[in-house]
Image (tube, grey):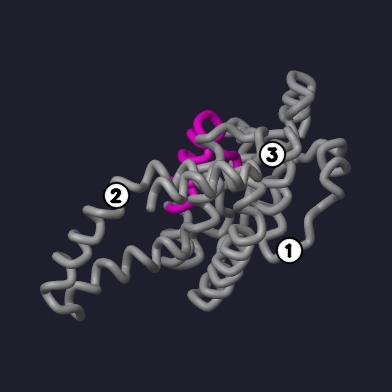
Amino acid sequence: LLSALPEFKQDHRLGFVQFAMEPTNTEKNCLTKALAIGARILRSQQAAKTKYGFTLFYGHNGIWRREALEKIGGWQESISEDTDTAIEARLAGYYGKYLPYVVSGEWSPESFAEVQKRTRKFAFGTTQLFFKKVIRILASKAPHWYEKIDILLHLLKYPLSATILLLVFLPFFIPPQTPLILGIVMMYIAPLTPIWLLLVKDLIKSDYEKAVSEVKMAG
């Protein structure tokens, strides 16, 4: 704690710091050993995300600035409350920082049932946050554009994973002509993509008259 506290003195916008986490029960069984490898990969990702994306808070092993929590109404009450609180802090102008030099312990699930339970919570909670906050995230001026992409990808990682699996196995169950039909459709939809992106941008800014004119141009 003493080594992490000076980080808050350097920047008043620092809302929280997340410590590096190392599983303490790695040698329990093969599952905990596999999860430990995943934890090390996650540590390397977090270091990159702090510099080039959005820093996540994992609900423990970290320190929060009291002022940041008070500004967003305290700890958020939702299924993925840790991610929810980190996002609200970023929208309020604060940011998080990953501290790889502060290593702390973390318990890993020791059975597949425990992993399934945790994954179900993560999947439902993050997907719920996407639908609740996507408009606010896109409209906010606090996060940089690359942070917004990182946040949305994190919130959608479980639905996207399911979609990718579906696309991998879909060719085995659909007629061979389907990809050709989809290709023809995309030929006509793709050129309109910039117009639809501008439409979404104007709708977010509540510029409805301009959005309507762009729809008429697209037609």
Question: Does 110 appear above or below 188?
Answer: below
Q: In the image, what residue type sits under mark 1? A: Ser
Q: Which residue corresponds to mark 1? A: 78
Q: Which residue is mark 3?
A: 90
Magenta span: 38-55
User: Which residue bears the numbered disc 2?
Assistant: 190
Structural distance between the alpha carbons of marks 1 and 2? 37 Å
Image height of 212 relative to 113, above or below:
above
Q: Nearer the viewer, mark 1 or mark 2?
A: 2
Residue in the picture at 70% in, 40% down = 91
Q: Percent position (x, y) of residue 100?
A: 57, 33
**Alpha carbon separation for disc pair 3 and 2:** 33 Å
In primary-sequence order, the first of circles 3 and 2 is 3
**Residue 132 colored in magenta in the image:** no
Q: Position of residue 205 (x, y in %)?
A: 63, 41
> Is residue 4 shown above or below 131?
above
